[in-house]
Amino acid sequence: MSEDGSPFTDRAQGFVAVAPAYRRQGLGTRLAADVDRFAATAGVRWLETETLERELAASLPLLRKRGFKELERYQTSRQRPATVNLSRLDELRSRLRHDGIETVALPEIDGEQSRQELYRCQTAIWRDMPHEAHVDWQDPPFDTLIRSIFERPAVLLESFFVARDGDHMVGLSYLLRRPDGDAEVGDTGVLSSHRRRGIARVLKMLVTRWATRHGISVVHTDNRADNAGMLAINRELGFQPDEVVVIMEKTMATPAAI
Ligand SMILES: CC(C)(COP(=O)(O)OP(=O)(O)OC[C@H]1O[C@@H](n2cnc3c(N)ncnc32)[C@H](O)[C@@H]1OP(=O)(O)O)[C@@H](O)C(=O)NCCC(=O)NCCS
């Protein structure tokens, strides 16, 4: 299951970590073997795990021995919202309005119809995020997705901005609260029919202004390293590159071969 409540198809994520003082005693190998066995019995076809680029030298020998190959990389980055120049926001926003695109905070338009629109827009955006062709998932049921936004304590609902073309929701961007008081970007996306009109830029600027006004000192995000569009917007809005997360994948043996 992804963190958004979408069940993966034939896929699972596994995590193995050993505290530095206990390394080089075979614990990582034993834990990884346990995870493998569990995944095989559960009928998992692809097993994912993640490591940091700066830890690859230590983790890669074990991962390779266990049959993992690199799947994708994510660039993490952080922004200090109070330092971002938002002087063009009102002008860019009214230019969009003039072209028929309204940008509003989600709570202002909440209702049955906008929730249906939100479901359609969010699930379409997930499908459009860069991913490998064999990585698949089922869209979560309507109620699960709506609960994961309106009832998840981490979601900062007031920071949730959407773009609408008439009643049709075409873009969104919002923040999640981190336990230490920082925030992280939940998702940002614009339907393919409405791209390159400056909608994502305005949505992220609105989110940045909200973060500044609410005293959030740091906003974190991560984007697939080949997501040129999102990385360009983030750079423009002051995000500074940080760690690179490497996702590794193992194709499990077919059940008959285990
Ligand atoms: C990334 C995404 C949100 C951009 O939305 P958008 O509304 O088209 O972006 P904007 O029009 O505001 O773009 C602003 C600037 O970003 C840059 N940019 C946007 N898309 C780009 C692309 N595909 N390639 C290169 N630069 C791009 C450009 O500098 C652009 O300015 P310009 O059009 O004047 O050249 C959209 O492509 C999308 O929804 N992708 C799928 C979902 C996704 O990957 N979300 C991020 C996951 S974390």
Image (cartoon, rainbow, N blue to C red):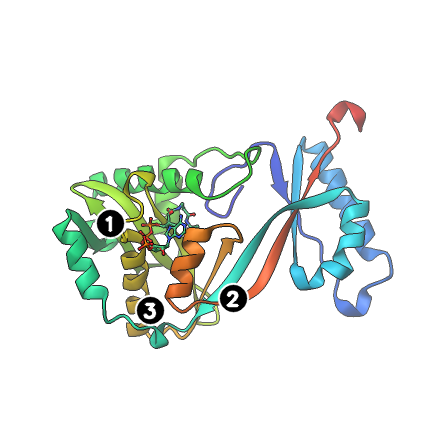
> Given this view, does label 1 or label 2 mark the residue nearer the observer?
2
The outermost residue toward the left is: 98
Residue at the disc numbered 2:
241
Q: Amino acid at mark 3?
A: Ala
Q: Is residue 252 left or right of residue 1?
A: right
Mark 3 to mark 2 CA distance (whole Å) = 19 Å
| Mark 1 or 2, nearer chain start | 1
Residue 162 location (% of width, % of height):
26, 51
Residue plotted at (76% across, 60% down)? 57
| Mark 3 or 2, nearer chain start | 3
Residue plotted at (37% across, 73% down)? 216
> Given this view, does label 1 or label 3 mark the residue nearer the observer?
1
Q: Secondary structure at mark 2?
A: strand
Name the quarter where the N terminus is drawn: top right
Mark 3, other Cα within 10 Å: few <14 / some 14–19 / many ≥20: many
In the image, the residue with mark 2 has its CB under 8 Å from the nearest atom of ligand 1: no
Q: Is residue 194 visible?
A: yes
| Mark 1 or 3, nearer chain start | 1
Mark carried by residue 211: 3
Residue 120 location (% of width, % of height):
32, 37
Q: Amino acid at mark 2?
A: Pro
Q: Secondary structure at mark 3?
A: helix
Displayed quadrant of residue 114: top left
Q: Amino acid at mark 1?
A: Ala
